[in-house]
Amino acid sequence: MDEQQRDTEAGATPVKTEHYKNRLYSKILRELSEEDLKNPAISKMIIEENESLKIQIETAHRFETDYHEADKKLAIQLEKNKQKVSFEILHDFCIALGGIVATLTTLDLSKPVALNNWIFCAVGLALIAGASYAKWKK
């Protein structure tokens, strides 16, 4: 199973095919002689078979085009999802780090608050505010 199937949880799904025409005459068409090919009925039968095959080819081309378009859209959506997950991880990390830095400055309340504590507190609050702003803006 490749990465795309694993990410979308898509497995192999059977495709039902429709036959446009019953293939009763397929063996007869292979056994025709030159005299039989001159018969107008045989020519019409061959032309009808040819038209049926053309329709099948056109349908197959449409399915192929639709498949490639859907595959491109899926790849784009998977990439957007990866970017979103990365942004969420960075956001959560900045919030946690900011909270830890801001909290560490106020743990020891018995000592007087020094300038270093205020700098760490400001850095921690800036991390929290920056991460929150980035999430709000997106």
Image: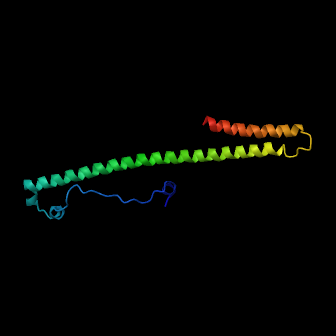
Where is 36 relative to 120, above or below?
Answer: below
Where is 37 relative to 94, above or below?
Answer: below
How many numbered circles does the render carry?
Answer: 0
Residue at 24% x, 57% y is 19
The image quarter in which residue 94 lies: top right
The C terminus - image quarter? top right
Spot occupied by residue 24 in the image (x, y as percentages of width and height): 17, 62
Q: Nearer the viewer, residue 52 or 32?
A: 52
Residue at 68% x, 39% y is 131
Q: In screen coordinates, is 28 left or right of 119?
A: left
Q: Residue lying at the far front in this picture: please name it.
A: 110
Where is 78 relative to 12, above or below?
Answer: above
Spot occupied by residue 61 in the image (x, y as percentages of width and height): 32, 49
The image quarter in which residue 121 lies: top right
Residue at 90% x, 38% y is 114
Q: How is the image coloured?
A: rainbow
Residue at 50% x, 58% y is 2
Spot occupied by residue 88 in the image (x, y as percentages of width and height): 63, 45
